[in-house]
Image (cartoon, grey):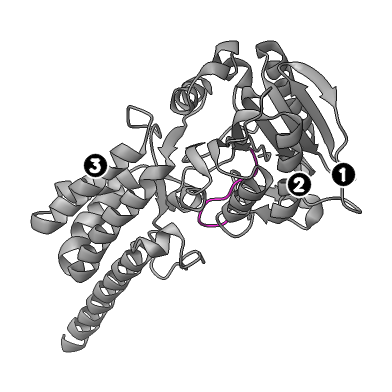
Amino acid sequence: MIALALVAGLHCTAAAETWSLVATICADGDLAPLGEQYAQRLVAAARTAGWSLALQLDNGDERPSRRLLRAGEEVRVEGPVADGAPNLACAGTLTEFLALAGAEVPAERYAVVVFGHGASASGRGWDGATVGAWPALSIDVSAGGDALKPDELAEAIAEGLGGRAEIVVLDCCYGASLEVAWALREVAGLVVASPGRLRSTGLAWDAMLEPAGTSLGPEELALGWAAGAGQDLTVLRADRLEELRGSLRRLCGLMVERMPVAAPSLTEARSACPTWGSESEMCDLRALCAGVAAGSSGELKVAAEQTLGTIDRCVGLPGWGDGRGAVTVPFACGFGRSWPAVAPQGFGESSGWGAMIRAYHARLRNLMQRTDNDRRHDGAAT
């Protein structure tokens, strides 16, 4: 998909609007026509609703176009561009644009949306084609396929807007992973994203942007956007992610210690929970924990139930099922499948999730080897 960044932070001035949108659309390659249409719809929606907007569009041209709206009134501004075609999927270019937006459309609160070609843990996009190393929020084809990483987006928000965003909307496939949200936790109040695929035409901003929205608080606005987007979105409270990591670390630690006992309930839970990605390698953590709790007893059951509670406090959107309210973690089923290379300080490794999955796969391999050895022994004895 496309890369749209709508940033929500704190940048107060005397004449500031309550909210401003800042959008960067990385739409070169196969996304060029869709990016143009997306930009036109977003500008029209902001104009109609009286929203302030800073928009940057890269459709593969040498110089990206930039448009500014102040309370619905458009003013065109050409920002500085580096020599040659700038890479919109990097922290430096995004930082420069966000700083321009903060100066030209100042607000008490900003909202950042990243709308782009996202990748699941297998490194594949919506069509199953290889996109790049996970997690990726957008791809700049003209820059050699460089991917915008969540930590690059976090750096741009912190440096370009000088603080933390109130809302980050990830209008890209597979954005509602805890690996992504964890990287944004210090710069985002709320993260709005989808656990699976999103339509390449993008979210329904014409229905989401209303004049009354500029006076709403962050959570009310984010929930309204998720409800009116026309697609399944999850609203994550970033300030609850540390609590979630702690409870999951306890659960994963117990499962590693007791893997022979935990493996059957984990297998059953994994087979029953919703999955996404070209290899079904992304699973709904809440459904998985519910399955483990139902199939366990003692400390394992208690730890799984406690993790369920922290997930419920972390997710702002009420109602569960069919992708609604899902947050994802990678859980490939095949034996020996390589684990995605993620940073040690990322959610998967720091929560113990990666270690638990590796222990689970080792247990399954051991069982298969024992079964094969038994079969060879039986054959030799007959």
Residue 224 x/y as whole percent: 48, 21
Residue at point 48%, 38% (across, down): 189
Q: Decide whether residue 121 is among the magenta residues.
A: yes
**In the current view of this chain or complex, which residue is farthest to the left?**
298
**Mark 1: which secondary structure?**
loop
Give the left or right position of residue 203, taking residue 322 as reference: right
**Residue numbers of the magenta segment:** 115-124
Which is more N-terminal, label 3 or label 1?
1
Residue on which the image places disc 1: 80
Q: Please state, as top left, top right, bottom left or bottom right, where the N terminus lies in the image.
A: top right
Of circles 3 and 2, the one toward us is 2
Q: Is residue 164 above or below residue 246?
A: above
Amino acid on which disc 1 is placed: Pro
Q: Within 10 Å of the Cα at label 2, are there few (<14), some (14-19), or many (20+) other Cα atoms? A: some
Q: Within 10 Å of the Cα at label 1, are there few (<14), some (14-19), or many (20+) other Cα atoms? A: few
Residue on which the image places disc 2: 96
Dot 2 and dot 1 residues touching (CB under 8 Å): yes
Compute the Cα span from label 3 to label 2: 40 Å
